[in-house]
Amino acid sequence: MKSSDRIKEAPLRPPSNGFAHNGFRNLAIALIVGWLTLFVLFPNLMILAVSLLTRDESQMIAPLFTLGNYLRLLDPLYWDVILHSLWLALLATLICLGAGYPFAWLVARLPARVRPLLLFLMVVPFWTNSLIRTYALKVLMGTRGLVNSLLLDLGLIERPIQMMYTEFAVIIGLVYVLLPFMILPLYSAMEKLDLRLLEAAQDLGASPLQRFVHVVLPLTLPGIVAGCLLVFLPAMGMFYVSDLLGGAKHLLIGNVIKTAFLNTRDWPFGAATSVTLTVLMGLLLWCYWRAGKLLRRKGALA
């Protein structure tokens, strides 16, 4: 048989789609990288550059390099605001964890057909803008609000309680806005929990507390850490919550940034404060990554 006959008898192969697949993948990567570069990298570089400049007499930006904007953050006034922000964010995180953990455990242990309904009912109110929901808290906690009116009608108090413009009101507002961000990671971790491990621990004589400490808590730790980060990081910058519920006495670091950009028009100082907050959040994320790496290494050794 001639070679030409062999070529004619060979079956035709379908054209390979490897080029099309690689082209689509490269296009997707290019779009993602371009999006992150245009809307994340460039704006952050601009903020960093502005933070190293000065403000001129016309309240605009002068191209004079300085580190004074960062040194101003060492002033006791701003340092107290940063520490106060960390304190309020920590309290809000602990309260969200204390309230969200048993709720997530309850939902995870319910029948599978009921869980989506409860999660839906929990999420539905949060489809409304958080600013509007914060205004609703003012109606509840005002001196003539629903809470004080109810307590007065029940005879539990003689005069309205001052709840608005206090640290308590700010914490309640942060918890109300951020609680779902704690519940959802906890529920995701608890839903994957193997109940046979609890049964085995019970058969070995472990008490309910021992089962929780040695079985449930370690297995749900990733959800705890993720939920705490999702609550703690945004809590420091929610300036509108402290504006509406805390007044001028209970500021967050987000209020300093908002005032610098919108009121005093000191953009370099506002940019320096934003960079400081970003670095602080980055350090917390790095600690989370390191802790997760150490836990995985410990689990592998065990």
Image (cartoon, rainbow, N blue to C red):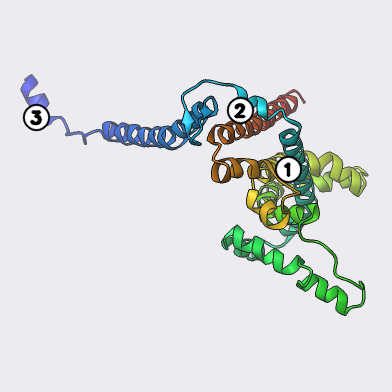
What percent of the width, then of the height, locates residue 198? Answer: 82, 47
For residue 285, side relative to residue 84 (left or right): left
Say left or right for 24 vs 51: left
Tell me, for residue 69, which label it has, or none.
Answer: 2
Can residue 232 be seen in the rendering of this structure?
yes
> Which residue is at a point 74% across and 33% down the rendered structure image?
79
- What is the CA distance from the residue labelled 3 to the residue labelled 2? 78 Å
User: Which residue is drawn at the image coordinates 77% and 72% (left, top)?
Assistant: 144
Circle 1 SS class: helix
Q: Name the residue: 59% across, 31% down.
A: 272
3 and 1 marks in contact (CB < 8 Å): no
Q: Nearer the viewer, mark 3 or mark 2?
A: 2
Disc 1 versus disc 2: nearer the observer: 2
Q: Amino acid at mark 1?
A: Ile
Q: Is residue 1 visible?
A: no
Question: The residue under label 2 is which amino acid type?
Answer: Asn
Furthest toward the front, the residue is 57
**Where's residue 239, x and y in %?**
64, 48
Q: Secondary structure at mark 2?
A: helix
Which mark is first along the chain, 2 or 3? 3
Q: Is residue 219 above or below residue 248?
A: above
Q: Nearer the viewer, residue 222 or 74?
A: 74
Identify residue for label 1: 224
Q: Earlier in the sequence, mark 3 or mark 1?
A: 3
Residue at the disc numbered 3: 8
x and y percentages locating residue 49 in the rendered image: 49, 26
- Mark nearer the N terminus (1 vs 2): 2
